[in-house]
Image (cartoon, helix red, strand yellow):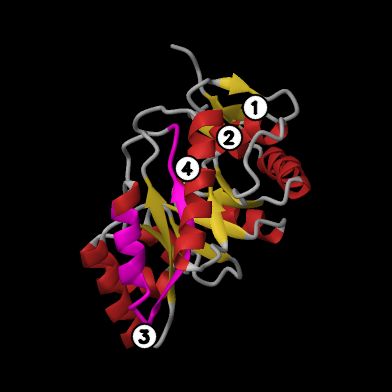
Amino acid sequence: MYPKLIINLNGIIDNMHIIQKVCKKRNISLSVTTKLLSGNKEMVTSLVENGAECICDSKIENLILYQNLNVEKWLIRLPMLSEIHEVVKYADVSLNSELVTIQALNEEAKKQNKTHKIILMYELGDLREGCLKEELKLLLKECFNLKNIEVYGLGVNLSCYGEILPNDENMLELALLVDELEEEFNIKFKIVSGGNSSSYEMLCEDKLPEQINNLRMGELIYLGRIPCLEKEVPTLNQDNFILKAQII
């Protein structure tokens, strides 16, 4: 018997449906992070066919594999300048915090006769990517001059590089920022993406501010546990990936 990985696809889909119901009750959209699946088109196709409305990946190569799937696709990291053409062609949305990159996306979108959506990232302490408030205001102002860029929303990243967990304080900071920017610039963000699987407990306890209307989740869907805390959620399946091998 050779070592093999046994994947319980039904368990993953069940987890997604359970989380979707929790999100829907609180008017929050769920973006399914697919980077853990490493370009497995069969699994991602099943997720889409079973109700995933948005998929997120950190590799543009994977989004290219999924190009024929009828679902919104996000590149959930800052684009490299060397891949701008592919990002505009294969990703509907990308996360951004650098003006030079956004300007390059605008020029490429013009060439492709498209409008590329961006989510501007705000730094909440995790130190993976994002702008501070005044930098974000300057960036936002410049984006309004770019005809082929749509500022789709605002996002934050938590529980990654710095293992900063969402809490009442940093979620309130995000909510107040959204209110301030929308009032100052007379806009309404379509997406306010307030975090990932680590936000699940606050979501279930109705502690997320009403300004947040999106979460990006992967680990909770696939492994049934909350990142950083390594905490299993009893209502979800944890046995979706089983490594089977002989012990020698």
Along the polypeptide, which appears first: circle 3 or circle 4? 4
Report the disc number at residue 112. 3
**The one of 9 and 166 positioned closer to us in this rendering:** 166
Give the structural element (helix, strand or loop) at label 1: loop
Give the structural element (helix, strand or loop) at label 4: helix
Task: Decide whether residue 6 is among the magenta residues.
Answer: no
Q: CA distance from mark 1 to mark 2?
A: 18 Å
Q: Residue at x 33, y 78 (%)?
A: 145
Q: Position of residue 2 (x, y in %)?
A: 48, 29
Figure check: 61 above or below 241: below
Q: Is residue 86 left or right of residue 54?
A: left
Q: Which residue is mark 4?
A: 36
Report the disc number at residue 199. 2
Other residues around mark 4 within 10 Å, as few (<14) / some (14–19) / many (≥20): few
Along the polypeptide, which appears first: circle 4 or circle 1? 4
Q: CA distance from mark 3 to mark 2?
A: 37 Å
Res. 153 in view:
no
Along the polypeptide, which appears first: circle 1 or circle 2? 2
Q: Nearer the viewer, mark 2 or mark 4?
A: 2
The amino acid at mark 1 is Gln
Range covered by the magenta-colored residues: 135-159
The amino acid at mark 3 is Gln
Q: Kindly indicate whether the residue at mark 2 contacts the one at mark 3 (C-beta within 8 angstroms).
A: no
